[in-house]
Image (cartoon, rainbow, N blue to C red):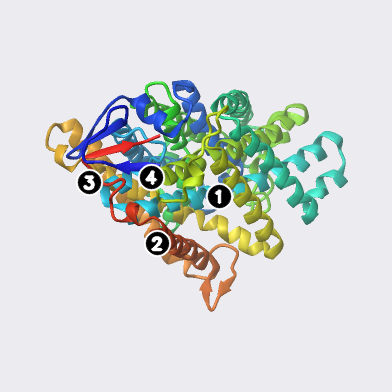
C-alpha cells in the first residue's frame, strides 16, 4: 500500500523529490518496496531480455516481404529510419530511469510529468499493446510448431493441424500457459531460458546471412542483386505514403526493447544498467535487421515471382520460402526452429513489462491492490502475471472463434498503441527535466532535444496511421458503418481504457487527486 506523509517516519523507505529531479535513498530501497528480487539481472541478462521481447527472427520473416512491397530495394533505408525514433526515445527512457528506476516505467514517469490521468492512459497503452502482442506471438508459435513438425516428419497431415481451429487454439493456450508459468517463477527462470533461445536466434541469422551473401555473389541466381549503397537512401522511396507505410512496419520491428527498463528494480545498478542494456539491445537489433535485409535482398531480389521478396504468396513468411534455397534441406530446418524459438522466447519475456506495469499501477493505487502481491518464494508479481496470461488466452480464443478478420485487424491496430505510449513517454522526459535543460549541452540534448524529436516523429506516425485506418481497405478490408475496422478497434481500445480509468477514479480517488504519485509530491513514502 502507498501512503503520503508530510514527513517520513522512522523505518520507512523514502523517495524524495525536489524540482524535476529525484534524490533517491538508494536504488535497492525502492525495489524492496514492491518486493521484487533485487540484483538478479546484470547488463547482459537485461539486454538479452530486450532482444528476446522484440523477437527479431519472427519480425524479419513476417516483415521483410511487406516492407519490400511498400518501398522496394529501399528496405534497409526504411529499417534505419524506423531505428531513429526508437533510438531517440531510448535516450528518454535512459534519462528517466536514472532519475526514477521504477518498474512502472512509462506509467510512473508520465504520472510524475503530466499527472495521474495522462499517466494512467500511458500505462493502459502499454498494457493493451502487450496483450495484443502476446496473443499474436502465441498464435505464431503455434503455427510454426505444426509447420516444423510437418517439416521434420514429412507429414502434410501434421502441418495441416494448424488449420484446425480448435486444435490451433488449444495448442496456443498451452503455449500461453507454459510462458506464464516460466514468468511466474521469476527472473532467474526467465533469464536462463532466454540465453539459450536468443543465442540460437542470432546464431541461425548469422549462418543465413553468410550463406545468402555467398550464394548471391556467385552470380548463378536469377533475380539476385548486387549490393548498392543507394539501398540506404530513404529519400529514394517512390512516395511519402509508401515511406510512412514502410516506416510503420519498421517501428513495429523494434518494439519491445523497453522490457529492459521494466526489470530495473531487479537489475544490478538499477539507475544505469537498464538504460545501457536498452541501447545494447537496439544496436544488436538494427545490426541484425540491416545485415539480414541486405543478404536477403542480394539473394532473392525484390521481384514478385518465385523467391523474390516482393512475392505476395510468401510475404507473410519469407524464411519459409528461403530456408531450403539459402541453407539447404538439412540446415534449412534451423530457420523454422529459429522462428519458433523467437516467437516462444518473446511470448515468455513479453509477460515481464505487462506484469510489472500492472504491479506498479497497483502499488500506486491506480489499479486494485490485489495485483501488487509478490510471490514470497519467486519474488515475482504472481497475480499480475497470471492475470496477463488469462487475459491473453481469453482474448485470442474469443477473437479466433469470433472472426479471423477481427484478429488480423487487432494486430494492425498495435502500431497505434506503440506510438501512443512511446511518444507520451518521450515528451514526459523533456517536461520532467525542463528545469535542467539549460544546465549543460548534454542535458539539453539527451533530456530535451532528442526525446522531443523522437516523440514528434512517433506522434506523426500515430496521426498518419490514425488517418489511414479510417479507410476500410486498411488491414483486412472489413468495416463498421463504413469506417475501417482497424480504426474502430484501435480507437475503441483507447476508449475502453478511458472507461476503466473512470471506474478506478471512483474506487481510488487518492491516486487521481494526485495524492499518491505526482510531480509535486514532496515525499513519497512506501509503507510495507
Indicate which label's residue lies in the foreground, 4 or 3.
Answer: 4
Marking on residue 364? 4
Q: Residue at x 61, y 29 (%)?
A: 201
Q: Name which quarter of the figure residue 376 lies in.
A: top right
Residue denoted by label 1: 131
Q: Residue at x 45, y 54 (%)?
A: 417
State whether residue 188 is above or below residue 152.
above
| C-alpha span from label 2 to label 1 | 25 Å
Q: Residue 423: image x %, image y %?
A: 35, 49
Residue denoted by label 2: 506
State whether residue 317 is above or below residue 472.
above
| C-alpha span from label 2 to label 4 | 15 Å
| C-alpha span from label 3 to label 1 | 29 Å
How dense is the environment of label 3, judged by Cα within 10 Å: few (below 14), some, or many (20 and up)?
many
Indicate which label's residue lies in the foreground, 2 or 3.
Answer: 2
Q: Residue at x 57, y 61 (%)?
A: 409
How dense is the environment of label 2, judged by Cα within 10 Å: few (below 14), some, or many (20 and up)?
few
Tell which residue pokes out farthest to the front in this image: 10
Q: Residue 307: image x %, image y %?
A: 67, 44
Q: Which element carries disc 1, helix, strand or loop?
A: helix
Task: Work out whether residue 452 or residue 429 is closer to the camera in this orientation and state it.
Answer: 429
| C-alpha span from label 1 to label 4 | 22 Å
Please tell me which of labels 4 and 3 falls first in the chain: 4
State whether residue 405 is above or below residue 195.
below
Task: Work out whether residue 76 or residue 201 is closer to the camera in this orientation and state it.
Answer: 201
Task: Work out whether residue 426 or residue 175 is closer to the camera in this orientation and state it.
Answer: 175
Q: Which element carries disc 2, helix, strand or loop?
A: helix
In contact (CB < 8 Å): disc 2 and disc 4: no
Please tell me which of labels 2 and 4 falls first in the chain: 4
Amino acid at each position: 500500500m502507498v501512503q503520503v506523509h508530510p514527513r517520513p517516519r522512522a523505518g520507512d523507505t523514502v523517495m524524495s523529490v525536489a524540482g524535476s529531479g529525484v534524490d533517491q535513498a538508494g536504488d535497492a530501497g525502492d525495489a524492496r518496496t514492491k518486493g521484487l528480487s533485487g540484483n538478479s539481472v546484470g547488463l547482459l541478462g537485461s539486454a538479452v531480455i530486450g532482444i528476446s521481447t522484440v523477437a527479431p527472427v519472427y519480425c524479419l520473416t513476417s516483415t521483410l516481404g511487406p516492407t519490400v512491397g511498400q518501398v522496394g530495394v529501399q528496405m534497409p533505408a526504411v529499417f534505419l529510419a524506423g531505428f531513429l525514433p526508437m533510438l531517440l526515445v531510448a535516450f528518454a527512457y535512459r534519462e528517466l530511469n536514472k532519475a526514477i528506476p521504477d518498474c512502472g516505467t512509462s506509467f510512473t514517469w508520465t504520472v510524475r510529468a503530466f499527472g495521474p490521468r495522462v499517466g494512467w492512459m500511458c500505462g493502459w497503452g502499454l498494457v493493451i499493446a502487450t496483450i495484443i502482442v502476446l496473443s499474436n506471438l502465441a498464435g505464431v508459435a503455434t503455427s510454426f510448431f505444426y509447420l516444423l513438425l510437418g517439416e521434420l516428419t514429412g507429414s502434410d497431415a501434421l502441418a495441416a493441424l494448424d488449420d484446425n481451429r480448435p486444435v490451433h487454439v488449444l495448442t496456443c493456450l498451452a503455449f500461453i500457459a507454459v510462458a506464464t508459468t516460466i514468468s511466474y517463477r521469476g527472473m532467474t527462470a526467465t533469464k536462463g531460458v532466454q540465453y539459450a533461445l536468443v543465442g540460437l536466434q542470432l546464431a541461425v541469422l548469422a549462418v543465413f546471412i553468410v550463406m545468402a551473401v555467398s550464394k548471391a555473389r556467385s552470380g548463378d541466381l536469377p533475380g539476385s542483386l548486387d549490393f548498392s549503397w543507394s539501398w540506404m537512401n530513404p529519400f529514394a522511396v517512390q512516395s511519402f505514403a509508401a515511406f510512412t507505410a514502410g516506416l510503420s512496419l519498421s517501428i513495429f520491428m523494434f518494439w519491445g526493447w523497453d522490457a529492459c527498463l521494466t526489470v530495473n528494480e531487479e537489475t544490478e545498478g538499477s539507475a544505469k544498467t537498464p538504460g545501457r542494456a536498452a541501447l545494447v539491445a537496439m544496436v544488436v537489433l538494427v545490426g541484425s535487421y540491416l545485415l539480414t535485409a541486405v543478404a536477403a535482398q542480394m539473394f532473392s531480389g525484390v521481384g514478385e515471382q518465385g523467391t523474390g521478396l516482393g512475392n505476395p504468396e510468401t510475404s507473410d513468411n519469407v524464411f519459409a520460402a528461403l530456408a531450403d534455397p539459402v541453407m539447404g534441406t538439412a540446415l534449412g530446418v534451423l530457420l523454422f526452429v529459429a522462428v519458433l524459438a523467437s516467437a516462444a522466447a518473446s511470448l515468455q519475456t513479453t509477460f515481464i513489462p505487462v506484469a510489472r506495469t500492472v504491479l506498479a499501477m497497483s502499488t500506486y493505487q491506480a489499479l486494485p491492490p490485489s495485483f501488487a502481491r509478490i510471490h514470497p518464494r519467486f519474488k515475482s508479481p504472481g497475480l499480475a502475471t497470471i492475470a496477463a496470461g488469462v487475459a491473453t488466452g481469453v482474448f485470442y480464443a474469443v477473437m479466433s472463434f469470433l472472426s479471423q478478420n477481427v484478429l488480423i485487424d487487432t494486430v494492425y491496430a498495435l502500431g497505434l498503441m506503440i506510438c501512443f505510449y512511446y511518444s507520451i513517454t518521450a515528451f514526459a522526459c523533456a517536461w520532467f527535466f525542463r528545469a535542467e535543460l539549460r544546465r549543460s549541452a548534454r542535458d539539453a540534448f539527451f533530456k530535451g532535444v532528442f526525446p522531443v524529436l523522437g516523440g514528434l516523429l512517433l506522434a506523426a506516425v500515430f496521426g498518419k496511421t490514425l488517418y489511414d485506418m479510417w479507410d476500410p481497405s486498411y488491414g483486412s478490408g472489413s468495416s463498421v458503418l463504413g469506417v475501417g475496422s482497424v480504426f474502430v478497434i484501435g480507437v475503441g481500445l483507447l476508449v475502453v481504457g478511458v472507461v476503466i480509468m473512470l471506474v478506478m477514479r471512483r474506487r481510488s480517488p487518492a491516486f487521481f487527486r494526485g495524492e499518491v504519485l505526482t510531480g509535486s509530491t514532496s515525499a513519497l513514502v512506501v509503507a510495507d
